[in-house]
Amino acid sequence: MTPSSVTLYFFTFLLAFCSLFYELVYAQVLSVCLGGTKMQYLTIIALFTFALGMGSIVFGRVKLRYPIRKTFFLIECLLTLLGSTGPFFITWLLQPGGMEGTFGLKVALSYFTIFLIGFLSGFEIPCLFAMGKDNKGKILAMDYVGMLSASILFPLLFLPKIGTAPGALVIAACNGYALVWLRCDKPRLVTTMLLSLVVTASIALVLMNVEGLNNILSNLYLGEVK
Amino acid sequence: MNLLFVTFTSSFCSMCFSMIMALVMTEFTGEEVLTQCLTVGPYLLGLGVGSALADRISESVRMKRLWLLEWASVIFLPLIPVLQLIGIFLFIHFSPDDVTLESKKALQFLLGYTGLLSFFSGMLGGAQLPIILGESKTHSEEVILATNYLGPLAAGIFVVALAGNATPLSLQLFWTGCIQLAGLLALVLLLPDRVKSMSLLFIPLIALIGTAHFYPHLELYTVKASYLRTKADVKNLLHPGDLLRVISSYGELERVRTPYQTIDLFIEPPDLGVGIPGNATVYLNRRPQFDLLTSATYHQSMVYAGMNLLGRRPESVLILGAGDGLLLTELRPLKLPSVTMVELDQGMINWSKSNPVIATLNKGSLEKFPEGTKLIVGDAISFLRQNKGKKFDLVFIDFPFPNGHELAKLYSVEFYKMVSSVLSPDGIIVVDLPLYFDKSRELARESRIILKTMKVAGLEKPFLFGPLASFIAVSPSDRPLAFDYAKFPDGLTNQAYANFLSPFREEEITSEEWSRVQVNTMFWPKDL
């Protein structure tokens, strides 16, 4: 089934928004854990752009095992997982009593997670191109608008209003809408509505526990949670 | 091969300039996160728009357009930071009197302006890729794309390495411009009319050298104007030389850039006609830290308030920050058994040792340490996180003011919890903090946030003092803090004694009001 253009553009916007948002959240978490806000943001933006390109190139060269829609669904599952749990994982990893291992290795692992998000996000555009063959220009435009929106809304709305961890979880839940869209190949109204309800409920749940979620991250950082 | 090199230099340089743009603006706004985000977003959008527009270029003129774009980029991109400075300079001079560079209005203007410049720089970068993809006959699309994406990664490493070494922005601009010029040269070799194009290379070369040469001067004028808060009339624009002469002739500005901060020492001459004495003010990241006339008051207040509130001779003292060595100067005569100072910035320490004004003020306290005094060059947060059970009776926290997220971390719940964990049970923390008041003389939002943050961190009874230079003293113990005025030593400045008055009453804030005050955490930073 070919998705309608409007739906396709909306999800292009949403997925680009989510990808850059995750990276900005990671930049914020790393700037807390490692220090040097300016340097962390510069490094992560550079790494993200590189990973995005690499993902796009690699996707063009691999032979897909599953149909495009299922592949896309799996990619989004991974991105949702990495986006939502990554900030907690990195904070735990870099805490004084966190995972065993040299500090350099832990930092490398943190950056690898960031690279992975960029790399997987790089798969999105070729997937979207495959789904909306005649609308490449508009898909690209929505992709850039999505990233622009993330870069504006993260520092002006999400970070000051709900903080890092809830921000990542809300956006991961929004990514969940894309999962619903991709999963419901032959959309049945009831299934779609039910899944959308679950996603909306999880967003509401996150928003109701903003302080608690930020405290979890703080406690992980202070080593009060092992 | 040449086209691949052009691809790399084009993406590398446009990303480098976008990052340099963000660095320039961060220096003036102090807002790292906002500036970084609002530079990268428009840049990415510009890439997309440029790419879409370039798709429309017809095949017959592609190489000509590529040359033109690359040529324009080599001239325009290094000029962007200069345009940023000119924008800031004009804003300082033509904004209303009550709008300072630290105000929200200034932030909106500066970020909007930078976003626009970033968009154009992205557009120039983005427009080149589709043309190269269309023109390349020897390389596959993937190889060109991979080279194109390698550029931003290399740019990140390059800019971070240069900024980490405190390389002046003019040099960062120059090196990046040279790399772009090399790309342009490689492109010229692919063109049929090489001689004509080669002759046009001197224009960007001159523009680049001019930019690198004039940037530091323009930067000094702009920074100085921001400290003097000079204003101008539209007709002054007809004679900009006069305006610049006035700014340059008043006082003397010394600017030192370290990997962590920019230190400014602004020396103002005395006005003998009206009896105003000269002064020298130290600014860290453009925020005033201390000045010559009030330095003794400030540092004596901090040290002796802590000693007085502790009520006994401290066994061990921890100083966080204070790389100027002035707190050490005050502590030295007390011959305390153990003083540990943790300062992040070796550049600040070196400058405080070598600058004649500061070295005279700190009496060489950073040159040779008495027995028991130890200097650790490192991050205060890392020191606190890795501290293995050593306790301190007195902790002096002397950081720059919390403008921007990087510094706001040092005023967060997590940070205060970490400081509490190294404090002896009756220990005292003295924090240098400007207490702001709003128009109705109520403690302002920012100060309330920091007080509430301390309370949440378990430091429940903050004691505020210092009508001349304000501080917060706090202890994890339950005993209420108050000065024993009889125990202050002789020999302090009159202003220091006056500064031990405590006219602030945080108890006047009701519990309902407290409940509405936000808490600053590292992961949920508040606008301080």
Image: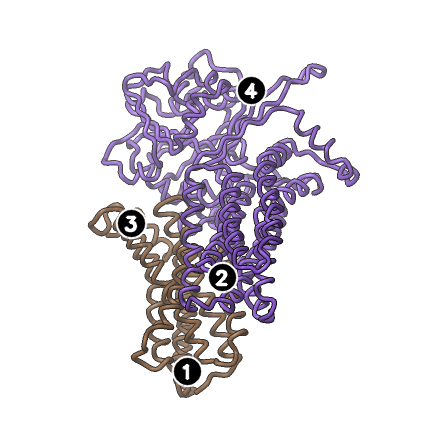
Chain colours: A brown, B purple
Residue pointed to by mark 4: B293
For the residues bearing labels 2 and 3, Cβ distance under 8 angstroms:
no
Residues B127 and B317: in front is B127
Which is closer to the viewer, label 1 or label 3?
A: 3
Q: Amino acid at mark 1?
A: Thr
Q: Amino acid at mark 3?
A: Leu
Q: Amino acid at mark 2?
A: Ala
Instruction: Answer left or right for B296 relative to B99.
Output: left
Which is closer to the viewer, label 4 or label 3?
A: 3
For the residues bearing labels 2 and 1, Cβ distance under 8 angstroms:
no
Measure the C-alpha gap from mark 4 to mark 3.
44 Å
Quadrant housing residue B67 = bottom right
Residue pointed to by mark 2: A150
Chain where mark 1 sits: A
Which is closer to the viewer, label 4 or label 2?
A: 2
Chain where mark 4 sits: B
Residue pointed to by mark 3: A94
| Among numbered discs 2 and 1, the one appearing first in the sequence | 2
